[in-house]
Image (spheres, rainbow, N blue to C red):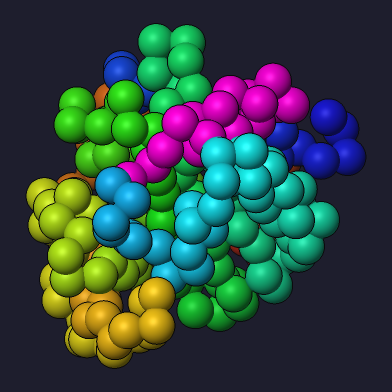
Amino acid sequence: MRNWPIFGLRVTTPRLELRLPSLDDLDALADLAAEGVHDPDAMPFLFPWTDAEPAERARRSVSYHFRQWGDWSPEKWACAFVTVVDGAVAGTQEVWASDFAVTRQAETGSWIGRRFQGRGIGTEMRAAVLHLAFAGLGARHAVSGAFADNHASLGVSRRLGYAPDGVEIRSRRGEPAELLRLRLARDAWTARDDVEIHGLEPCLPLFGVSRTTESG
């Protein structure tokens, strides 16, 4: 799409692809949301969007992407990819930032359908989006956060080299919960030579970046 080149942006590894979703991709993602993302007794998200009936979870997952596209600006953007494994949509990996041209700091978040969990996909898709942030966009820091009982997310961050960055107390389902902040500096990031970025150059102005710092 000439006037919205983000739809041509892809990040690939030997195992998966990150891409902006088509309408068919969004339908597949919605089906995953309807099937369930986590144990009903747990809540890994700051905004409890999964506390809903299956059909409503599906609608929320679709409308979220529409809102992100409509609200995008170079000063405040959120790039929500679908994660595709063996031709199937497995989940979503997002990277977002405010005033990125100044801060060079990006934040990430993700979820995976339950039938795709436990296969190392979460680590692979985070590694892919970190490559986009650091090698493609020239980020200096990537930050993330997870509740203290979200062991899967914390494990991904630990494997990829994040360092502790403080603790917050947040309200979760009406109860206080400890949120662990994490930070990965560019100097601590380990680049992989099997991650490729496709179609980034025409997208750079939309990210508030004047030029790529490293080809991928």
**Residue 146 drawn at (x, y percent):** 27, 67
Question: Is residue 73 shown left or right of residue 137?
Answer: right
- Res 216 seen here: no
Magenta span main SS: helix
Q: Which picture quadrant has residue 70?
A: bottom right
Q: Residue at x 63, y 38 (%)?
A: 55
**Residue 9 drawn at (x, y percent):** 61, 34
Range shown magenta: 21-38
Q: Quadrant of the C terminus?
A: top left
Q: Compared with residue 69, is residue 82 higher up or lower down, i.e. above or below?
A: above
Q: Which picture quadrant has residue 206?
A: bottom right
Check the image and name the residue furthest to the right: 3
Question: Is residue 194 shown left or right of residue 200?
Answer: left
Q: Compared with residue 148, is residue 193 higher up or lower down, i.e. above or below?
A: above
Would you say residue 152 sits in the magenta stretch? no
Decide which of 211, 59 is in the foreground and name it.
59
Q: Which residue is drawn at 23% across and 54% down?
A: 153
Q: Compared with residue 205, is residue 166 higher up or lower down, i.e. above or below?
A: below
Question: Is residue 113 shown left or right of residue 191?
Answer: right
Q: Compared with residue 12, is residue 131 higher up or lower down, i.e. above or below?
A: below
**Tally of numbered discs:** 0
Decide which of 109, 31 is in the foreground and name it.
31
Q: Which residue is drawn at 40% across and 63% down?
A: 45
**Residue 156 drawn at (x, y percent):** 18, 49
Check the image and name the residue furthest to the top: 86
Q: Which residue is drawn at 19% across and 26% down?
A: 119
Decide which of 215, 34 is in the foreground and name it.
34
Would you say residue 32 sits in the magenta stretch? yes
Question: Is residue 27 shown left or right of residue 53?
Answer: right
**Residue 71 drawn at (x, y percent):** 78, 62
Q: Quadrant of the N terminus?
A: top right
- Res 85 seen here: yes
